[in-house]
Amino acid sequence: MTSTTTGLPDRYRPLDQVAPDEETATGVIRSWRARDRVLNRDVALRVHTPGGPAAREWITRALTAGGLATPALAMVYDAAEGTGGTEPGGAAYVVNEWIEGTRLSDRLASDGPLPEREARSLVRRLAEGVAEAHRVGLAVGGLTPEHVVLRPGGLVGLLSVPAASGTEKGDIAALGALLELCLTGSRPQDAGRAGIASPDLAALVRRARSDDPATGLSSAATMVALLAAPPRPGTGPQEAVRPDGYTDSGWMRRLRERREDTPDDDGPVRLDRGSLPPVPGAAPGRPLPPRPAAPAAEEDDLDWGETFDTDDDAPADDRRSSSSARRRLAVVGLPLLALALVIAFALWFGNNVLSVAGSVDQEGSTPSASAGTSAGSASAPAPSSAAAPVAGAPVPVSAAAIYNPFGDGDPENDDDVASSVDGDPGTVWSTVTYRGSAAFGNLKPGVGVVYDLGSEQALAGVTITTTLPGSTVEVRTGSAPTGALEAFPVAATATLTGTDDIALSAPVTARYVLVWVTGLTQVADGFQADLAEVAVTAAG
């Protein structure tokens, strides 16, 4: 579809109108997908009629947005005010980055509400971009599910930056509405809408909407911090938002549940002397089991010999004499039996264990230094416990894991990390795609992969294969798989060209090797780096 719109430079050729006409207080805005003939790329083109003074405020806001570089907001490439009227040159326009992906409105319509973790991440990323805009005094506006695009790699982008009008408080309220929509699939005005399961997020939505300075959110940066914080323990699915607006705090709910679970009683229980305390949870008034009766006589009061005496008709003197004889036999005989057992064990130990040890010592002893050897012969060296590594040979990698200490908690293609050591250069681990800068979109200094060699090894270098030449890396080593980046000293740096043999500045003995990616290379929709194959070589 071609455009008859006037007042646009020949550089931009409208292709398709992508949104209905937007009526504003100053005119009409039409949104197009257009082609930039100079840079040969698609762009988002918005045209405001009339131009001139009517569009001046909008163009001024667009020029302010042009100084932002945040992945969450579509970049502004160009903006012009025009001259007003209907003659050529009379239309104002703003040219934005064109973002490919799935609209949030389409995702919710097809799959329903998002999982809590995904909803937190999505709104937090948007709030980060909005907070950056507020920092330079720009209210973004247009924060609707139709303008939010879910991009590959877990990123999110906002189209049509900035909207024709907006306020910072309106941006915060819109973020709260987006959070509720992501969690419930319904808007605030929808009848019979579901409540938000998490009490923390329900409270955050209420604060985002509140106009009370004492309870409302003070800034979009505050929302970022609250969404980045992990959920509090014990805040599982609850009905936190009710139609009547009544809510429970966590400790009040737990107190009420505990009181409901505790049976009513008739007051304190008075214990009798010698009785046991009541068992927790026992029904009031239920009798306790009786204590076992004490034995009629203690063992010490019995005659030990009488326990073996079954002749009840024998005279008492005879029974006493027989008991004394057995007692003397036990006193004398038991020690003699124990002594005999000790002597028998000593004889067995001497005949068996010591004799075997002596024979082993004689057969396995090495010849003394004075033992003669024949002319021209040499004694064979003792075999080593393990073969020394061959210089330049690959060192086996027992495990690999993502190292991302400066990340925001979202995965960095963690499931693909094994592809960097599977022996197949056709499979790769790659970073997610970043926008705005090869320095990870100015979000963090780098990301890497830690390789576990199983034990400490003498290392000489690393061979790295990549399918994205131009990225930069540091080879670092360490004694543990985690910790601060400073715990992995730099052993070498390189700019990857394809397959690179990177020699360490000096031989290093270490168990863990960290390939730390410090710079990305440009790809079709941003900046990225990958590791197709990593091999660690031994120093020998």
Image (spheres, rainbow, N blue to C red):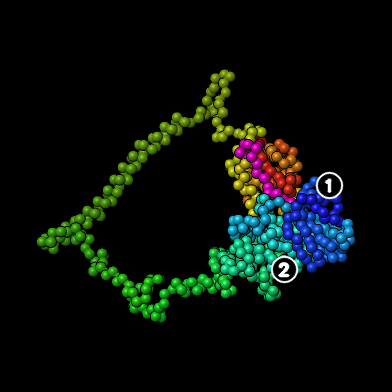
Q: Residue at x 59, y 43 (%)?
A: 399
- Decide whether residue 112 is among the magenta residues: no
Residue 490 appears in the rendering: no
10 Å crowding of disc 1: few (<14), some (14-19), many (20+):
few
Q: Residue at x 62, y 34 (%)?
A: 389
Label annotation for residue 458? none
Q: Earlier in the sequence, mark 2 or mark 1?
A: 1
Q: How many marks?
A: 2
Amino acid at circle 2: Gly
Q: Main secondary structure of the magenta part?
A: loop
Mark 1 element type: loop
* Span highlighted in magenta in the image: 421-437
Label annotation for residue 170? 2
Q: Whole-Å distance between the Cαs marked 2 and 1?
A: 37 Å
Q: Is residue 481 left or right of residue 288?
A: right
Q: Is residue 12 left or right of residue 256?
A: right
Q: Which residue is mark 1?
A: 38
Where residue 414 sits in the image (x, y, percent)?
A: 62, 48
Where residue 406 sits in the image (x, y, percent)?
A: 68, 54
Where residue 404 sits in the image (x, y, percent)?
A: 66, 51
Query: Looking at the image, which is closer to me, 384 or 39?
Result: 39
Q: Is residue 69 left or right of residue 485?
A: right
Amino acid at circle 1: Val
Q: Quadrant of the C terminus?
A: top right
Q: Residue at x 52, y 29 (%)?
A: 368
Query: Looking at the image, which is closer to me, 473 or 304?
Result: 473
> Residue 500 occupies which quadrant of the picture?
top right
